[in-house]
Amino acid sequence: MTIKELQERSYQQAVDKGWTERDVLLPEQVALIHSEASEALESWRKNEPVSWEDEKGKPQGIASEYADILIRVGHYAQLLGFDLEVEVLRKLKYNETRSHRHGGKRG
């Protein structure tokens, strides 16, 4: 699956499941993406396996939350009308020009 296909599939699934029936403004989009990252952190804090399924077969763990981040980003990229694959490739190309640990920040 390409990033473009992920974007299109994520958006279509959001449409199919009713998540496009109202406007989701950018601040809410950012908060919802952040909530998935926070769920990954909580999984780590609970010392859960990286990837597992609960008794109902629902994927759980850090891997599932990272997947949720990608799905939300794909949905919102389509909603905002930009090609996420183009933007990722453009950013990766730019990052090649940056110095080792540019900015000197931690992490």
Image (cartoon, helix red, strand yellow):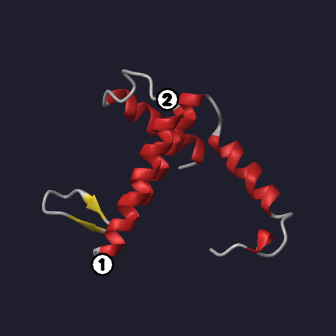
Residue 21 is labelled as none
In the image, residue 64 lies at what x, y percent?
36, 60
Question: Outermost residue, bottom direction?
Answer: 47
Residue 9 position (above or below residue 2): above
In the image, taking residue 2 as reference, residue 25 lies left or right, namely left
Residue drawn at (36%, 73%) of the image: 44
Is residue 53 shown to the viewer in this render?
Answer: yes
Front-most of 60 and 16? 60
Residue drawn at (84%, 65%) of the image: 98
Element type where label 2 sits in the image = loop
Pointer 2: what residue?
A: 25
In the image, taking residue 13 as reference, residue 53 lies left or right, namely left
In the image, residue 18 lies at what x, y percent?
32, 27
In the image, residue 91 lies at what x, y percent?
74, 53
Residue drawn at (53%, 50%) of the image: 1
In the image, residue 40 lies at what x, y percent?
38, 63
Front-most of 42 and 65? 42
Residue 47 is labelled as 1
Q: Quadrant of residue 101?
A: bottom right
